[in-house]
Image: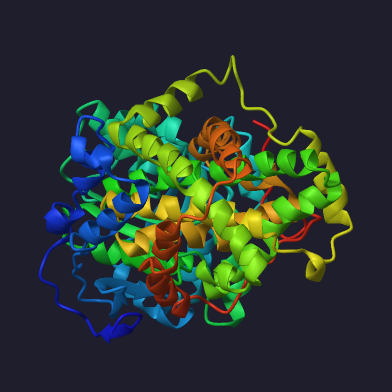
Amino acid sequence: MAGTVQNFSKVACRRTAAECSTQKALKPAVLPRQLRASKNASAAKMSSRQAMSVLCTATAEAHSVGDFKTALFDTDAADMAGEIEYVLKGGRDRFPKLKEAFKGIKTIGVIGWGSQGPAQAQNLRDSVKEVGLDITVKIGLRANSASVKEAEECGFTAENGTLGEVFEVIPEADLLLLLISDGAQAKLYPRILAAMKPGATLGLSHGFLLGVMKNENADFRPDIDVIAVCPKGMGPSVRRLYEQGKTVNGAGINASFAVHQDYTGRATDIALGWSLALGSPFTFATTLEMEYRSDIYGERGILLGGVHGIVESLFRRYTAQGMSEEDAFKNTVESITGPITKVISTKGIKAVYEGLDEAGKKEFMTAYSACYMPTKDIHYECYEDVQSGAELLSVTNAVARFDQFPMKNIEGTRMWAVGKKVRAERVESEIPIHPFTAGVYCAMMMSQIDTLREKGHSYSEVCNESVIEAVDSLNPYMHARGVAFMVDNCSHTARLGARKWAPRFDYILDQRAYCAVDDGLEIDSELESQFLNNPVHQALEVCASMRPSVDISISAEGDDGAGGARDY
């Protein structure tokens, strides 16, 4: 049964979303912490290979995913490496269901115009119009916001009743999508919640606000629904793929959804309708807390910060070994964002290794053996900083310092100047898969995957937050126009995290992993076996079976509506 998807028409499920959020299976495994504790004598004597083997065996028994109730939508049961997860498949042919999902909703308020706001507002407007719904999608912005002009250029204006001031829009909205920056949410949420009308639905696209409220011992008011739909990609890619999919029954970015509070009894159907209207190819269940843990952690890892650290460290290494700057860029950035990304997107992580010759496989696995544990060390630190709330506080503190210390450009080093020349002369078919680069990249990706699994996350969440978002949303942006175009099309939280953690990964690779290789490190046969036999490969096959046929198309010139990197 592994690697299958079954349809369940109007499935009646055994547990509510609230019950699923507290089930024992979603608690982090105890064993990883024991293995890391220096006071545990038996664990301390274990080699990293033995630890890996024990962890994979122990956690495989602990994970399961709860069902979710919907009388409106047909859902599918996906066998993710032996774990049954329920998902909603998307497609424009399902848009007629929006009439029932959005029953009683007259105004969808979209507060903010950052990474997600433009995409979600336009996708929702287009989707409800397609099925003839009398729903107004209205943008809420500060009166003096620089984004007013951009919103007007997209057809949202005060004259046609689709653009207003933030606290004018909030009390009008039946469904309020709060898409302002995380720092602004942390500052304004008491006033925003107070302004909502009773019975309205608060929609989040990130669980960050819950983490802030937990830090402050605050709760959502009880007379509203609180839901989340969280696209697993930057906002511009959500819009770009939606537009590309209009002729092929839909394309887009997968999303997770969560029902944190169901006051009306309709929260699940509203959330699923919202995700469907955004163009999500498939939607899976999570909780607000598990979402923000995996999301904030993931973007600091392989999605943004980690991959930036990899390419900076390898560019220096390859040029120090005598490679030309142009070839070093081709064998680092271009190799990852071009053929490695394409192979992972269409065939999976293991296929990168399997496509190499014997010498390439040896070089790949040498790099993998050297990089897996050092990167996992940083992954664990990052995850636990997010889980404890420390990383969230770091974000809100940094945002409060913007007037004094604004974010600056992150591609001012020599390699990115070289990259402009390389991209201008690129011949796509000539970009190589460098085995060492591939081994480093896949080691960091797999150590991120294993960290999430050991912390209790479902395969859908793991695959999307560690793999699919990287190869189908983010890497294509770096491939088109460089690292800043990728990182700075994202949220403030993501951009700050990438800047903070990229140097950590860069340092650990340079100081521990590459030094070990230079000292003659041998391939770790147990790590090799764990990589080749990891159940995530089966889960990725299932995810790939639900993938649209459309690849995101981003031009190098910036005339495709794919977004633009911000300077601050």
Say which of 185 and 22 sits in front.
22
Q: How many marks?
A: 0
The N terminus lies in which quarter of the figure? bottom left
> Residue at left 83%, top 40%?
417
Q: Is residue 489 left or right of residue 38?
A: right
Query: Is residue 269 visible to the viewer in this orientation of the structure?
Result: yes
Residue 446 is left or right of residue 242, and the answer is left
User: Is 515 situated left or right of 102 in this image?
Assistant: right
Asked if residue 441 shows in the view, the reply is no
Residue 315 placement, left or right of 420: left
Q: Which residue is more in the foreground, 204 or 153?
A: 204
Q: Which of these two is toward me, 490 or 120? A: 490
Position of 98 relative to 207 (above/below):
below
Residue 308 position in % (x across, y down) = 62, 42
Residue 366 coordinates in the image, percent (x, y)? 57, 54
Tell me if residue 240 comes above or below residue 169 in the rendering.
below
Image quadrant of residue 470?
bottom right
> Split into 4 quadrants, where in the image is the C terminus?
top right
Which residue sits at x=52%, y=66%?
349
Q: Position of residue 506 (x, y in %)?
A: 59, 36
**Where is 87 relative to 404, above or below?**
below
The colour scheme used to paint the residues is: rainbow
Q: What residue appears at the point 42 percent right and 70 percent down from the top-left corner?
A: 537
The foreground one among 403 and 427 is: 427
